[in-house]
Image (cartoon, rainbow, N blue to C red):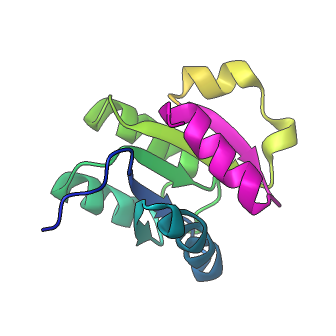
Amino acid sequence: MTPQPAGALRVLAVDDEEGIRMLMAAILEPVGHTVIAAGSGEEALEHLAAGRFDLVISDIGLGAGMSGWDLAQQVQARSPGTRFLLATGWGASIDPQELEAKGVDGLLTKPYNVEEFRHTVARITGQP
């Protein structure tokens, strides 16, 4: 396995829409981050069990099964050092205190643009 460049993140992108997962990878991989995609919360937990991630980015609605909220709590319990970013169309209606209580480090409201996405990832992970 090739080591990651300094400042590069291992990111788990979770969304039930394949196009959104592909978009997240297309935004983050050109700046040196490694992106692994998962189509459900359950699949995301399998990836988390198999390796370490610096950041999980998830929608709230993930189809049948666990929600993004459920996933955030599982990530917090299983991998407390992993940052968690919600990227959702419901962002405007979410109370910031609810985010903190559920182990979410940041919120990005869809639709977002490339710069906004990269800036939010950098901010919550402490990247320059």
**What residue sits 64% from the left and 81% below the top?**
19
**What residue sits 54% from the left and 63% below the top?**
28
The x and y percentages for residue 124 are: 56, 33
Return the residue found at the far right.
92
Quarter of the image where the N terminus is located:
bottom left
The x and y percentages for residue 78 are: 27, 36
Viewer-side residue, 34 vs 20: 34
Residue 37 vertical placement versus 33 (above, below): below
Q: Is residue 116 left or right of residue 66?
A: right
Quarter of the image where the C terminus is located:
top right
Residues shaded magenta: 104-128
Q: Quadrant of residue 113?
A: bottom right
Residue 94 vertical placement versus 24 (above, below): above
Viewer-side residue, 96 vs 69: 96
**What residue sits 54% from the left and 28% below the top?**
102
Q: Is residue 45 left or right of residue 122?
A: left
The x and y percentages for residue 121 are: 58, 44
**What residue sits 32% from the left and 29% below the top?**
80
Residue 28 vertical placement versus 90 (above, below): below
The x and y percentages for residue 17 are: 62, 76
Figure label count: 0
Q: Is residue 22 magenta?
A: no
